[in-house]
Image (spheres, helix red, strand yellow):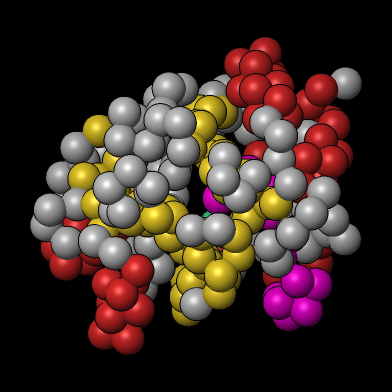
Amino acid sequence: MATFGPELWLFDGPAVTGAAGFEFPTRMVVIRLPRHGGLWVWSPVALTEDLRSTVDALGPVRHLVAPNSLHHTFLAEWAAAYPDAHVHAAPGLTPQIAGTEIHSTLGDEPDAAWAGDLDQVVVRGNRITTEAVFFHRASATVIVADLVQQIPRGWYRGWRAVVARLDLMTATKPSVPRKFRLATSDKTAAREGVRRILNWPANRLVMAHGAPISSGGKEALRQAFEWLLH
Ligand SMILES: [Fe+2]
């Protein structure tokens, strides 16, 4: 566990295997909501006894968040471990795919439980997945799952290293992978979401797949989305 900002913690989990055998590093964000002290858990990683006791020491788990239709691998085990938690999922993730009940679908307005503490934007217009991007006000942190990535250069070997490099998954700065650019069929809709993201007074940037950035997050995001804005 790493403290990354006020009331914000990062937990790195074991890698998961995705399409074509590509392994992805995993990262979970836990935010303690000030009003009731409940925990907001974004993109849960594999749940172990150790992880569970570390999280429990921070507060009661109230919200489990799947930010897009791809980040649900461990959602069901967390929902089973924390049956009182509310499960929130991005549009496109069904209970059948997630293997657990979904209590609410993430939209462009923050849930009443975290409005004022977190803002959110659903980035639409992408054929691969629709992602909800969050902004934690107290720490000025933007939280993004797959839309922006920066996996370390040495993470992949052989042909996968070549593909990852061409796809900009392992670029020298946080980038929107080329597959997501190509899958942006409705650029107007995507641009609308991205413009809202770029209006946030962001300082920090957390990606599920990339080293967290402690300052200059807004500029990093602007550069990552430049291809879409111009
Ligand atoms: Fe991912």
Nearer to the camera, 173 or 116 = 116
Q: Is residue 188 left or right of residue 59?
A: right
Nearer to the camera, 127 or 94 = 94
Nearer to the camera, 62 or 189 = 62
Can residue 135 be seen in the rendering of this structure? Answer: yes
Nearer to the camera, 92 or 57 = 57
The magenta stretch spans which residues? 144-159
Against 17, residue 221 (above or below) is above
Against 83, residue 63 (above or below) is above
Residue 189: name its quadrant. top right
Residue 170: name its quadrant. bottom right
**Residue 196 location (% of width, % of height):** 65, 23
Total count of labels: 0
**Residue 2 location (% of width, % of height):** 56, 74
Residue positioned 31% across, 54% down in the render: 37
Q: Quadrant of the C terminus?
A: top right
Q: Is residue 151 left or right of residue 9?
A: right
Residue 161: name its quadrant. bottom right
Per the image, is 147 magenta? yes
Residue positioned 78% across, 79% down in the render: 154
Residue positioned 48% across, 37% down in the render: 118
**Residue 59 location (% of width, % of height):** 29, 64
| Magenta highlight: main SS | loop
- The outermost residue toward the front is 35
- The outermost residue toward the top is 188
Against 175, residue 170 (above or below) is below
Residue positioned 70% across, 66% down in the render: 211
Per the image, is 50 magenta? no
Can residue 185 be seen in the rendering of this structure? Answer: no
